[in-house]
């Protein structure tokens, strides 16, 4: 029975390993996201692996899996005692929307510099200054009635202004 496993790639070799594994008829997957960066004052977007130096590979452990470790771009399969360990069922399926880099946009927010807009909740539609992030929540400085008010919101409730 085929399961998903994690392979470690050499630095920056995710796409090489992906191509080589597919040529060997393995099902492989590298989740990507699009990052907005600024170089010399000009913003641009670049696709980066969600998990740098890692690739997801689907195969049957009983059948052939040893060639994976010797594939160009691959370092090793993650596991115990020279045996790969499968991922929990459904884990990779959750990452399926990240197959195409354009589907996810993550903007690096600079504290005190980046403007964000709140999409949902009681402050919906207001724009403020990003202050900090802790886990899945962000702190935003809003100007309400001429005063600076600091509020927290879920990171999913904001967007770049």
Image (cartoon, grey):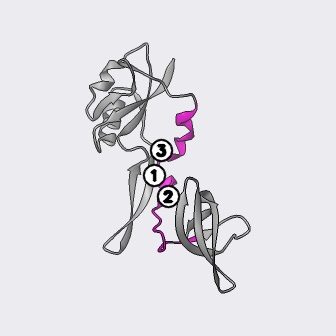
Residue 161 visible in this rendered orientation of the protein: no
- Based on the displayed image, in which of its 4 quarters is residue 66 positioned? top left
Q: Residue at x 29, y 39 (%)?
A: 16
x, y (%) of residue 151?
Answer: 64, 68
Q: Are marks 2 and 1 in contact (CB under 8 Å)?
A: yes
The residue tagged 3 is 99
Residue 33 visible in this rendered orientation of the protein: yes
x, y (%) of residue 104?
Answer: 51, 54
Return the disc, 2 or 1, that comes first in the chain's sequence.
1
Say what secondary structure mark 2 lies in: strand
CA gap between label 3 and label 2 equals 13 Å
Disc 2 residue crowd, few under 14, some 14–19, many 20+, Cα 10 Å: some
- Based on the displayed image, in which of its 4 quarters is residue 34 positioned? bottom left
CA gap between label 2 and label 1 equals 6 Å
Q: Residue at x 55, y 34 (%)?
A: 91
Q: Is residue 88 left or right of residue 14?
A: right
Say what secondary structure mark 3 lies in: helix
The residue tagged 2 is 105
Residue 109 lies in the magenta stretch: yes
Say what secondary structure mark 1 lies in: strand
Highlighted range, magenta: 90-116
In the picture as drawn, the residue positioned furthest to the top comes out as 62
In the picture as drawn, the residue positioned furthest to the right comes out as 122
Disc 1 residue crowd, few under 14, some 14–19, many 20+, Cα 10 Å: many
CA gap between label 3 and label 1 equals 9 Å
The residue tagged 1 is 33
Q: Is residue 104 above or below residue 114?
A: above
């Amino acid at each position: 029975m085929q399961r998903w496993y994690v392979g470690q790639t050499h630095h920056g070799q995710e796409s090489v390993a992906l191509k080589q594994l597919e040529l060997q008829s393995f099902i492989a997957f590298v989740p990507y996201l699009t990052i907005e960066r600024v170089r010399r004052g000009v913003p641009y977007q670049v696709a980066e692996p969600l998990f740098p130096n890692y690739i997801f590979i689907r195969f049957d452990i009983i059948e052939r899996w040893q060639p994976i470790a010797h594939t160009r771009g691959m370092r090793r399969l993650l596991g115990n005692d020279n045996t790969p360990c499968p991922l929990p069922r459904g884990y990779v399926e959750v990452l399926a929307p990240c197959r195409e880099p354009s589907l996810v946009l993550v903007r690096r927010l600079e504290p005190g510099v980046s403007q964000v807009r709140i999409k949902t909740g009681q402050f919906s539609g207001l724009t403020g200054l990003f202050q900090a992030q802790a886990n899945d929540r962000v702190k935003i400085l809003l100007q309400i009635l001429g005063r600076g008010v600091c509020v927290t919101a879920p990171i999913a409730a904001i967007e770049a202004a």
